[in-house]
Amino acid sequence: MTSTGQNRRRAPGMSPAERREMIVRAALPLIAEYGAAVTTSRIARAAGIGEATIFRVFTDKEELLDACMAEALRPDHAVTELASIPLDQPLADRLAEAADALRAHLERMGSVATALHTSGHRRRGDSPDQQVRGMGRAESLASIGGAVAELLEPDRESLRLPPERVAGVFLGLLFTQLREEEHRLDVQALVELFLHGALGGPTESA
């Protein structure tokens, strides 16, 4: 008779790619806080694994940090957020949600990049994550621009330019504003300025 123990099967383990992804997700908030000074033991505790497991899928800590930077730069999460915005909302509301999602993406990306840079980490060229999963700056912007253009598509007939070009102008204004620490507009003011320009309504002649 076969014993219960012999019939029991182990649950399938993670693939190396899945384990890398899990470790990177656990490491990102720690890197934003501690930069390159974060220890692999702290990352392992956050991921709920032994420290040795990290080095089964990453050659060393530097490769892990490179993978985290590549993940932070990826536009996938932002594009997913943009795609979830309902197209039946008014255009101003769609753009306000888009601006919120993109600001969150850029701030997340900036926090990781700044923490690594200021703590002395320098990427060692293209890591496997960058080669397989990452995007260059142009491809990333094109992906985000395409998602914003989709949000503009329902109003194509009302736009002065094709949605793709309008999306590029909107992103340019948004990215410029993110660099304006002292005079940064809130989302509603930014969308109002973009849709209606700098001038108010016509003034009455004296």
Image (tube, rainbow, N blue to C red):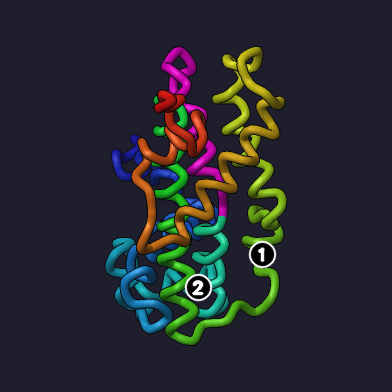
User: Is residue 67 positioned above or below 5 on the image?
Assistant: below
The reply, left or right, for residue 203 in relation to residue 169 is: left
Left or right for 154, reference 107: right
**Part of the protein shown in magenta:** 74-92
Q: How many marks?
A: 2
Residue under the image location 62 percent in, 61 percent down: 129
The answer to whether 54 is drawn above or below residue 122 in the figure is above
Q: Which residue is mark 2?
A: 65
Amino acid at circle 2:
Leu
The answer to whether residue 7 is seen in the rendering is no
Image location (x, y in percent) of residue 90? 43, 17
Residue 69 visible in the snapshot: yes
Looking at the image, which is closer to me, 44 or 131?
Answer: 131
Within-10-Å neighbours for mark 1: few <14, some 14–19, many 20+:
few
Q: Residue at x 69, y 34 (%)?
A: 165
**The C terminus, quarter of image:** top left
Q: Secondary structure at mark 1?
A: helix
Whether 129 is among the magenta residues is no
Say which residue label 1 marks.
128
Q: Secondary structure at mark 2?
A: helix
In the image, residue 26 lies at what x, y percent? 36, 60
How far across and how far down the image is residue 37, in percent?
Answer: 37, 83
Q: Can you tell which quarter of the image residue 79 is in?
A: top right
Above/below status of 125 relative to 46: below
Magenta stretch holds residue 78: yes
Residue 9 quadrant: top left
